[in-house]
Amino acid sequence: MTTQALLDAVAGGVRVVDLGRRLTVGMPQSPNHPAYWHAHPRRHGDMVRADGGSAANDMISMGTHVGTHIDALSHVSQDGRMHDGLGMVELGVHTIEPMVRRGVLLDVPETLGVERLEAGQEVTVADLEATLEKQSIAIGAGDVVLVRSGWGQHFDAGDGDTFRGLSTGVPGVGEAGATWLAARSVHAVGADTIAFERLAPGAGHGLLPAHRVLLVEHGIYIVETMALEELAAAGIHEFVFVLSPLPLFGATGSPVRPLAVVGR
């Protein structure tokens, strides 16, 4: 598409759906990562200029895998080896180029006729294929594929314990589903859950085979803790996906605010 065609499309009006979660102190997150914290070291009135003006400032601390975030390829290793045998500098989050790509939402609960998937339920290859057929779309090489489980409803409701699912489990793609996605040469995947893939009841984050398949074996980025309910409610299954990580040198991940852009 030419630059003029892009400008014409924007001039015709677009709808932007925010797929990122608001960062708040105490929000549900994986216990494996430092929590989000925000404070105002300087508040209005602490220092006042001669003309009466005042400025406040902020300080934040957080892990790079908290809230809506992207996993860099350096996030996971297998038997001491990261993707292509490269290191933290070559695979850090600073190497992820900004994404403006075709996005696809696979609304699995809609296909299965349920509000949301059950705790610990695996999204199977059959589920993924049935969803593509129901939505009458196909996955292309280089796409970003988002898998909705409906589990994000627990985040929306403020039920952090259920969302984390440390004892009950969390629905998501399993090893077979990850292999199926990788075979389609997708650029990145994402989900509305805390770890993208299925967490078995009582297992926590003890085993993450889909992360191995995607990050280590195939070099496919993972976006987690996404807000997908608005996109699903609108019946939007294809869109322009926009995402840009913070260029944190050598980091294994970054908070992100992904967007889905569609014409009106």
Image (tube, grey):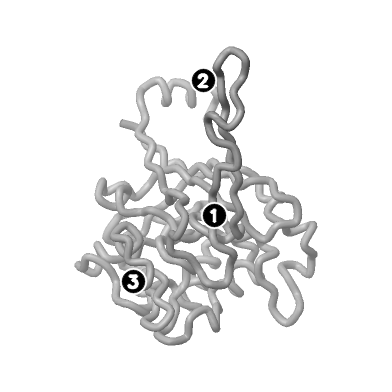
Q: 133 above or below 201?
A: above
Q: Which residue is mark 3?
A: 127
Which badge, 1 or 2, comes first in the chain's sequence? 2
13 to the left or right of 23: left
Q: Which residue is mark 2?
A: 4
Q: For marks 1 and 3, give the one nearer the viewer.
A: 1
Q: Give amino acid for label 3.
A: Asp
Q: Secondary structure at mark 1?
A: strand
177 to the left or right of 39: left
Label 1 packing within 10 angstroms: few (<14), some (14-19), many (20+):
some
Mark 1 touches mark 2? (CB < 8 Å): no
Look at the image and tell me whether residue 264 can be seen: yes
Q: 163 above or below 53?
A: below
Q: Residue 191: x percent and y percent?
A: 43, 61
Q: CA distance from mark 2 to mark 3?
A: 39 Å
Name the residue located 56 percent from the left edge and 32 percent from the top edge: 56
Q: Which residue is mark 1?
A: 37
168, 211: nearer the viewer: 168
Q: Give amino acid for label 1.
A: Trp
